[in-house]
Amino acid sequence: MSADGTVFEDGELAEGSEGVAEFYAAVGKLIKLFRERAGFTQRDLAHRLGYGEDLIGAVERGKRTPRVELLTAADELLGAAGVLQTVADDVMKAKVRVSARHPAFSKAFTKEEAQAIEIHEYSMIAIPGLLQTEAHARALYNMRRPWLSVEQVEQWVAARMTRQEILKRWPLPTLSWVIDEGVLLRPVGGRDVHEEQLRHLLEIGQMRGLELQILPLDRTGHAGMGGSFILLTPNGRSQIAYVEVQHVNRLITIPEDVRRMATRYGSLRAQALSSEASLALIEKRLVER
């Protein structure tokens, strides 16, 4: 958790989690009860479990979604006789109920993104959310498995379009994207949807203050082989990072980890085509369709 209490290094905030906040608060009280009975301080527990002290404190206050792995390990360490392990199953069910109503992006991330003064993203497998057309976003959600309801898809599409208000504000944050060329080749949603998406990328790439680069397929290797990620710089605070895979998300605040990712992004920008060459490549893909 950061110094001002708004960002965590993984998972999501418990506040505003659609009716489960009170449940998480009760779980936090249980952890505190067993911790104190075992004679551990928050620092002791954090050290023994391999988590940050601030994270343990936030979980105990009900401000942080307790991770199943934390509950399982704490149960054994604190001699909770299976109580916390049993609660872990209910926590998982609560998280599923919340995720059924919200996109996979964590609320902590979207809050930080909306206020960031810098946003940089490397995308290896998909068009970045801030750059997606409505039809493209709808196609992505419609291909989810298990299936999403029509209402859920429309809610998530609306949420994604709302995120894009960032591109309309002034002054703009510093914005840049590096997108793998392979993303341009997959016609998500069909020919017409994909063509509209490529034309939208061309428009974005020509906007003042936005930088869009394509990482060409002919690179024999590059710094982003570990996967996609986003770097955010909050106003007045240190840079943070965000990663998501298979709808599991993590907001990273550990300075050394963020520094490594920022270094990788710098290398990716150097390995990618220039903005002008990138737009030319997108135009080429449009002509080839």
Image (spheres, grey):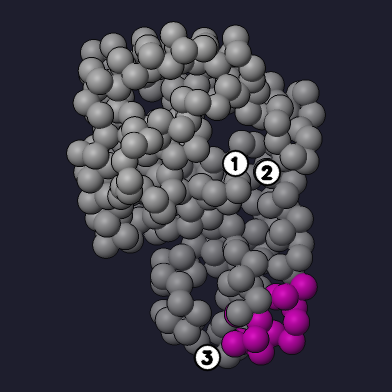
Q: Quadrant of the N terminus?
A: bottom left
Q: Are marks 1 and 2 in contact (CB under 8 Å)?
A: yes
Q: Callout 3, which amino acid?
A: Gly
Q: Regarding mark 1 in the picture, which secondary structure is present there?
A: loop
The disc labelled 1 sits on which kind of residue? Ala
For the residues marked 2 and 3, what is the alpha-carbon distance in whole angstroms? Answer: 36 Å
Looking at the image, tell me whether mark 1 or mark 2 is earlier in sequence order: 2
Q: Secondary structure at mark 2?
A: helix
- Where does the magenta region start and end? 74-86
List the residue tagged with mark 1: 104
> Badge 2 is on which residue?
99
Front-most of residues 6 and 168: 168
Which of marks 1 and 3 precedes in the sequence? 3
User: Is 86 rendered above or below residue 168?
Assistant: below
What label sits on residue 269 in the rendered view? none
Would you identify the image quadrant in which residue 104 lies? top right
| Location of residue 149 in the rendering, given as x and y in whole percent from the top left corner | 79, 29
Q: Nearer the viewer, residue 67 or 43?
A: 67
Q: Residues within 10 Å of mark 1 (few under 14, many from 20)?
A: some
Kindly identify which residue carries mark 3: 39
Instruction: Confirm or deny contact between disc 2 and disc 3 (CB under 8 A).
Output: no
Does residue 19 show up? no
Please indicate, yes or no, whether residue 283 appears anywhere in the rendered image: yes
Query: Is most of the magenta stretch helix, strand or loop?
Result: helix
Q: Position of residue 169 (x, y in %)?
A: 33, 16
- SS at mark 3 in the image: loop
From the viewer's perspective, tell me whether residue 101 is left or right of residue 233.
right
